[in-house]
Image (tube, rainbow, N blue to C red):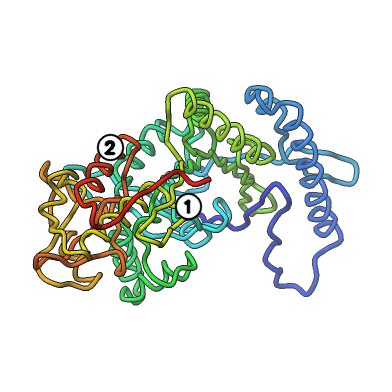
Amino acid sequence: MGVIANVASRAGLAQRNPPARSRRTAADAFGQSALRLLQLLRAMLASMVVLRHTHNLHNLKAFLMPIYELGRDTLSILPGVTFASKGILEEDIQRIFRTHIGIIAPDTFVIAEEFSDWTDSWRSIDLLCLDKEANLIVVELKRTKDGGHMELQAIRYAAMISKMTFADAVTAHSRFLSKKGEDGSNAQNAILEFLGWDQPRGSDFGKDVRIILVSADFSKEITTSVLWLNERELDIRCVRLRPYEFMGKTLVDIQQLLPLPEAVEYQVQIRKKAAEERSATEGGIDWTRYDLIVGAETFSNLYKRQLFRSVIRELVERGVLVSELQQIIPASKFVGVTGKLDGAAFRDAVAAMRTAAGAKYDFRRFYLADDDLFFAEGTTWALSNQWSISFLPLLDQLIERYPQAALSYKPSE
């Protein structure tokens, strides 16, 4: 079975392993230097093409240049090969990128390999990863020249893991470490260290799912689909692996085709502007902040979710029963567990519970930090963090019902 001996990026090539003899021949050294120079020129030319053809993928592909070997009097195209012809399987590629994920996705943490922790499906995610913003990443790998239907597979996987919690990620990574013969009990600390968190922050975990497609090449159907989906605020990247044969070695040219690296920031800004415009047109999300007045004290610049939490907590502390609050506020906005529990015990208990519709509770949609929980009527409670502007009339009713609490609010200036 062949192995990937060298990895070449647009900016250069990994050096060859030193030969057994003490020094290379002059021809070998010249060939290596020339190849490195030609690849740097290629990167410069590709960048020039990107600037001229940012919105035209067909033209971009037409201008992508092969790698050349520069002889003393010749210029020869480096022969391209296929992974299959070199005996390199998808499992080989997956194993290598599992260890070197930063080559295709910088600042990325591998949670699991061949992840398939769901029922009624035999499918698995090649590599399930995490970025520094605590977003999940589905990495799908193919060695074929057209990518097959990998974008459809990846979208399906992204939907299936979109509800993954921090605890789920810890469990998956623990299994991953144990399978590699490492200490699975270190899984949570490893994830926390990567994210730079002191403790789990469930509401900040997995807010989005990104997709990275890695293949020897991509069909027009895939690239067209990815361009269209990215315009609609998905984050899908296509990374091409093109293998070459050189001096008995297999080199791999690795390039991100979509989005064009030089245009990523521009496209992010375009998507952000489009989202803001749609939000303004459709009514969108209300980001108004509020000042809460409790007697003579004022709490300023609160988001709606903070406003609701503060009002409800204040009323509970004044002796108002949760059952009374639920006469106005929907019971689905509360989750309770009998007994006085700390945060860890409460989260474990809720993880085993189901909503009225039979679904798991989504930890991201509740205040579950230790200091957010409150105890009343022999029960530990957590409150939802999902409050749209349509709930404000209910908050007004709640405040009017308990005038002795001296609560009021107003939009922040």
Q: Total of numbered circles in the picture?
A: 2
Q: Residue at x 36, y 75 (%)?
A: 186
Quadrant of res 5: bottom right
Residue position for label 2 = 393
How dense is the environment of label 1, judged by Cα within 10 Å: few (below 14), some, or many (20 and up)? some
Q: Amino acid at mark 1?
A: Asn
Q: Which residue is found at the position 61% from the left and 46% from the top? A: 254
**Point 20% across, 61% down: residue:** 316
Specify which label sits upstream in the sequence, 1 or 2: 1
Which residue, as the protein is rendered here, is positioned at the far right? Answer: 73
Q: Is residue 51 above or below residue 344?
A: above
- Tag 1's secondary structure? strand
x then y, percent, for residue 137? 43, 49
Q: Position of residue 168 (x, y in %)?
A: 28, 59
Give x and y (percent) for residue 224.
52, 24
Q: Residues within 10 Å of mark 2 (few under 14, many from 20)?
A: few
Side of 262 relative to 175 (left or right): right
Mark 1 lies on residue: 301
